[in-house]
Image (cartoon, rainbow, N blue to C red):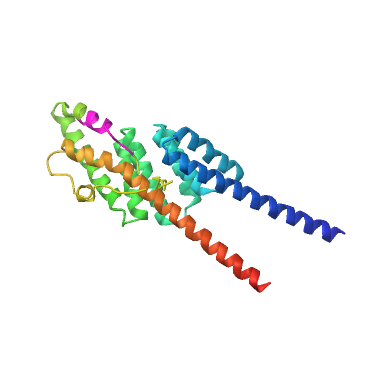
């Protein structure tokens, strides 16, 4: 009798766990559609619901960070990207996506030093991230120009801030990042061009700021593809196990 009770308890736990994971996946799927439709508050609610069902759903964390970014909640976005980093600390590419998006968030906050640090960390995790390399070069140039402006009386700073405020749109690394939700086409002819020596032009500034949204979409697409492959492999393994029975 005791053994039967244990088996029933195990069955119930497995059933509830399976239900919770399905509920989480459904919430993420609805949230992704809301995000695509630019309904960021609705997407935020769905990602939070997904995490209630399954607190280990790292995709929901990354996509939640991206919705915060889109709503100009940069501190909240950074916090969730850092949470995602801890969850994916054995996956350098995903860690790179999150660091990339943290850099984008700090750039939005005009904290250039922290943005530079985050882009460097993105490249340590994923040396192939040419977008992070380009962003790092631009931020370093901006810091150099700020220092020159400070030494020379500091008039150029206001103009840089105006340019920077125009269009700093993020990638989801999905991030997001996304995030690191994380979707497609950027002006590849320009995004990897290094900043011109001696000045940061308005065009260069706009290139970095406008490229961030595309980087987010591309990262989110990578995350979705990885999740789809993982699910496909899991389903195939389950089918093989059923045949063995």
- Where is residue 70 drawn, in percent x and y? 39, 35
Residue 6 visible in the shown view:
yes
Q: State the residue in front, 157 or 209.
A: 209
Q: Which residues are magenta?
A: 160-169
Location of the N terminus (image quadrant): bottom right
State the predominant SS element of the stretch in magenta: helix
**Residue 64 colored magenta?**
no
Residue under the point 60% across and 50% down = 21
- Where is residue 158 drawn, in percent x and y? 21, 26
Residue under the point 32% across and 52% down = 123
Q: Quadrant of residue 201?
A: top left
Toward the bottom, the furthest residue is 244
Location of the C terminus (image quadrant): bottom right
- Where is residue 222 drawn, in percent x and y? 40, 54
Residue under the point 57% across and 39% down = 49
In this picture, is 2 found above or below 202? below
Residue 100 visible in the shown view:
no
Toward the right, the furthest residue is 1
- Where is residue 171 drawn, in percent x and y? 35, 44
- Left/right of residue 154 with respect to residue 37 in the rendered view: left
- Left/right of residue 113 with respect to residue 182 in the rendered view: left
Q: State the residue in front, 180 or 213.
A: 213
């Amino acid at each position: 009798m005791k053994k039967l009770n244990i088996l029933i308890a195990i069955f119930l736990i497995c059933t509830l766990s399976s239900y919770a994971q399905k509920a989480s996946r459904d919430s993420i799927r609805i949230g992704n559609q809301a995000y695509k439709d630019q309904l960021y508050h609705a997407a935020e609610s769905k990602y939070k619901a997904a995490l209630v069902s399954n607190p280990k759903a790292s995709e929901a964390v990354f996509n939640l960070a991206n919705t915060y970014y889109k709503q100009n909640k940069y501190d909240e976005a950074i916090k969730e990207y850092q949470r995602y980093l801890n969850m994916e600390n054995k996956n350098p590419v995903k860690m790179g996506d999150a660091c990339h998006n943290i850099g984008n968030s700090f750039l939005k906050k005009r904290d250039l030093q922290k943005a530079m640090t985050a882009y460097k960390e993105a490249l340590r995790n994923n040396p192939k991230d040419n977008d992070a390399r380009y962003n790092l070069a631009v931020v370093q140039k901006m810091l150099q120009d700020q220092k020159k402006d400070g030494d020379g009386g500091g008039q150029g700073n206001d103009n840089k801030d105006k340019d920077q405020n125009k269009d700093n749109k993020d990638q989801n690394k999905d991030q997001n990042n996304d995030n690191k939700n994380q979707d497609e086409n950027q002006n590849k002819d320009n995004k990897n061009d290094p900043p011109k020596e001696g000045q940061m032009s308005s065009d260069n500034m706009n290139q970095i700021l406008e490229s961030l949204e595309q980087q987010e979409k591309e990262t989110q697409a990578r995350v979705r593809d990885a999740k789809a492959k993982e699910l496909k492999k899991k389903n195939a393994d389950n089918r093989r196990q059923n045949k063995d029975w």
